[in-house]
Every structure is written in structure tokens, then in C-alpha cells.
Amino acid sequence: MRFVLCIVFAALLPASAVAAKSASMSKGASMSIERAQAAAAKGDQDAAAAVGTTTDKQTCLNACSDRGYSKHDCDYGCRPGLCHTGGDQPYCVSK
């Protein structure tokens, strides 16, 4: 019985890791620049694209409001040091 449970657990572990990655990198996902750099170093292409494409806070705020988000949402999303890894164009907001 323990052997069967070990097999089931071993089979579920990689599936949960893949699900966690896809959930964290879903549209709208964000992370700190430090986390994005670490993920890029491990081969994460979305994180590498975000780190490679930085924008200043004001440009981020303008683009955010142009897309119809509220000022509060834009202030929260355009914090310096934050990388947006989800979406069509991953980017980081420079400090």
C-alpha cells in the first residue's frame, strides 16, 4: 500500500509544479525584478523578456491609463521594481 501511495505522490508532484508555474505566469502575472532575474537565469523566457524590456514609471502609467485602467490600478501596477511577466509584451518598471 505504501508503495502505491509513493507512486501516486511521485506522479502528482511534477504535475502540481507545472500547474503552479502556469498559474504564476498567467496573463497579468507580476514579480519583483529580483525574482524575474532569477527566473530568467533559470531559463524562463517570459521573465527574460520582461527583464530585457524596461520602462519608466510615467510611461507605464500613461500606457496603463490608455488601456482604460483606473488610476489606483495603474499606481499599483506601475510600482518601480515590478516586472509584468504575463501578457503579450512582458516588461519591468525601472526604479
Image: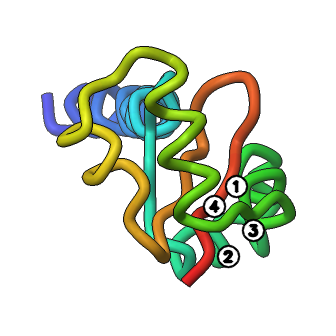
Does 94 sit above or below residue 54?
below
| Image location of residue 36, percent across then percent down | 60, 67
Q: CA distance from mark 4 to mark 3?
A: 18 Å
Q: Amino acid at mark 2?
A: Gln
Q: Which mark is residue 42?
A: 3
43 relative to 66 in the view: left or right: right
Q: Earlier in the sequence, mark 3 or mark 1?
A: 3
Q: Residue at x 25, y 27 (%)?
A: 70
**In front of the other: label 4 or label 1?**
4
Q: Residues within 10 Å of mark 3 (few under 14, many from 20)?
A: few
Q: Which mark is residue 74?
A: none
Q: Which mark is residue 37?
A: 2
Q: CA distance from mark 3 to mark 2?
A: 9 Å
Q: Earlier in the sequence, mark 4 or mark 3?
A: 3
Element class at badge 1: helix
Q: Amino acid at mark 1?
A: Ala
Q: Residues within 10 Å of mark 1 (few under 14, many from 20)?
A: many
Q: Residue at x 64, y 77 (%)?
A: 38
10 relative to 87 in the view: left or right: left
Residue carrying label 1 = 47
The one of 80 and 33 positioned closer to us in this rendering: 80
| Image location of residue 63, percent across then percent down | 59, 35
Q: Earlier in the sequence, mark 3 or mark 2?
A: 2
Where does the C terminus fall, quadrant-wise?
Answer: bottom right
**In front of the other: label 3 or label 1?**
1
| Image location of residue 89, percent across then percent down | 75, 33
Q: Are marks 1 and 2 in contact (CB under 8 Å)?
A: yes
Does 65 sit above or below residue 85?
above
Q: Earlier in the sequence, mark 4 or mark 2?
A: 2
Element class at badge 3: loop
